[in-house]
Image: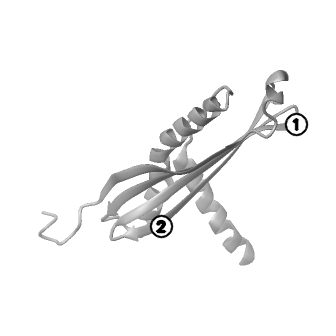
Amino acid sequence: MAEENNQVQPQLQIQRIFLKDISFESPRSPLIFQEEWKPEVGLELNTKSRQVGENLYEVVLEITVNVKNNDEPAYLVQVLQGGLFTIAGFEEKQLHHALGAFCPGTLFPYARENIDAIITKGSFSPVMLAPINFDALYMESLQKQQQPATETTQ
């Protein structure tokens, strides 16, 4: 039936998930291991996407974990987790939602695993990042983008 009215059935397929970049810094090692451990965890999250071929998109989830102990830096981890996704048959609004919410949500467990692995190799306990609602973050981002437009028209 889709062939009869020339409509492409919506499709979203994962082509590849890859580690684009990872870094770990622990500037106060090994002295940090002699201190009482009372970590303060800071988290930054960003996503980027770009079209790299016909119906082929690269999505990169960037997570930075900055941990301090007694107001001193303990370690910093940054992971850029990438993915290639084939996305076709979506309207523009649906495409942006897939790139801004679904794809980062798919990449998150891989990024979380890489973060925990590198922290453990640095001889620290894993952070165990909680699940993230990327749909809510995407909607919040949309609201922030629309807000300046409505504020300037008043």
Q: Quadrant of the N terminus?
A: bottom left
Where residue 50 is drawn, which disc sits there?
A: 2
Above or below, comparing residue 83 to residue 57 in the picture: above
Judged from the image, the secondary structure of the residue bearing numbered disc 1 is loop
Residue 138 in picture, x, y percent from top left: 56, 55
Q: What residue occupies the far front of the structure in this picture?
A: 30
On-image quarter of the C terminus: bottom right
Q: Nearer the viewer, residue 146 or 72?
A: 72
Q: Residue at x 35, y 51 (%)?
A: 14
User: Is any part of residue 91 visible from this angle?
Assistant: yes
Q: Badge 2: few (under 14), some or many (20 or more) residues near its Cα, within 10 Å?
A: few
Question: Number of numbered discs present?
Answer: 2
92 displayed left or right of 114: left
Snapshot colouring: one colour
Would you name the residue on which mark 1 appears? 71
Disc 1 marks which amino acid? Asp
- 15 or 25, which is in the foreground? 25
Under tag 2, what secondary structure?
strand
Could you tell me residue 39's position as x and y percent?
78, 30
